[in-house]
Amino acid sequence: MIIDAFPNNVAISVDSDGDDIADAFNQTCDTDCQTNSGLIIDAFPNNVAISVDSDGDGIADVFNQTCDIECQTNSGLIIDAFPNNVAISVDSDGDDIADAFNQACDAECQTSSGLIIDAFPNNAAASVDDNNDGMPDEWNENCDDECQKNSNLELETSGESNSGAGSLPWLLVTILSAVLLPRRGRLK
Ligand SMILES: [Ca+2]
Ligand SMILES: [Ca+2]
Ligand SMILES: [Ca+2]
Ligand SMILES: [Ca+2]
């Protein structure tokens, strides 16, 4: 015999972790009953800290309201930075580009997601570095002048144009010397 955790609610009865979110609807509660109840079901029925996982990737949307800071810390859990995207969940620098794909997201899932992964997961100033040289290809859209200055990063394009401008005169000097020097020798 089980004890009804919700004795005044005909839709639900079992709450294994005691966070007031039920494990499941009662078998006698059909689709109409479920909809009319307005209740959610515990996506983590054995974890008192969390209950909701909208995208079903195993990372919770939020901590339960009953889970205070201490409970949150003790849980050792992270919260889904992308609660409606099954491919990604973590964004350490909060620039909306994920640190990595979820482990459960295979190559096909990664491709179909159409997402890029943050090349600078701990720097909100930039996210793209196609050739992995540590210099960002572009600034993040919301990174203004001050943000760029404080990033300690240098854009790849600015580096390239600098070295190009610097090397062009040297190239001309080299070519001119090669053409002119032998002639001068001949004239003597
Ligand atoms: Ca529960
Ligand atoms: Ca999730
Ligand atoms: Ca997610
Ligand atoms: Ca990021």
Image (cartoon, grey):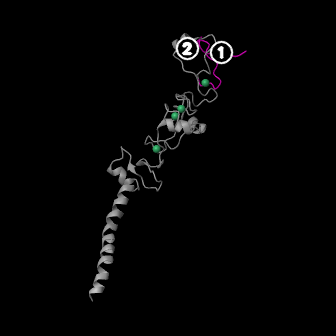
Q: Is residue 145 above or below residue 65?
A: below
Badges 2 and 1: C-beta atoms under 8 Å apart? no
Query: Mark 1 CB in 8 Å range of ligand 1?
Result: no
User: What crowding class fits label 1: few (fewer than 14 Cα within 10 Å), some (14-19), or many (20 or more)?
Assistant: few
- Report x, y in % for residue 119: 47, 49
In the image, is residue 31 above or below residue 53? Answer: above
Is residue 114 among the parts visible in the rendering? yes
Q: Residue furthest front?
A: 186
Q: The residue under label 1 is which amino acid type? A: Asp
Q: Is residue 78 visible?
A: no
Mark 2 surroundings within 10 Å by alpha-carbon count, few (fewer than 14), some (14 through 19), many (20 or more): some
Taking the spot 29% from the left edge, 82% from the top edge, the residue there is 183
Closer to us: 107 or 124 = 107
Q: Amino acid at mark 2?
A: Gln
Q: Specify the segment rendered in magenta.
A: 1-19
For ligand 1, the image quadrant comes to: top right
Q: Which residue is mark 2?
A: 34
* Residue 161 locus on image (x, y percent): 34, 60
Q: Closest to the observer: 49 or 161?
A: 161
Compared to 63, does 32 lie above or below? above
Front-lying residue, 170 or 73: 170
Whole-Å distance between the Cαs marked 2 and 1? 17 Å
Residue found at the very far bottom of the displayed protein: 188
Classify residue 176 by image quadrant: bottom left
Q: Which mark is residue 181?
A: none
User: Does 48 lie within the magenta span?
Assistant: no
- Where on the picture, by quarter, is residue 56? top right
Name the residue tied to disc 1: 4
Q: Secondary structure at mark 2?
A: helix
Farthest residue toward the right? Answer: 1
The residue that appears at 30% across and 69% down in the rendered structure is: 169
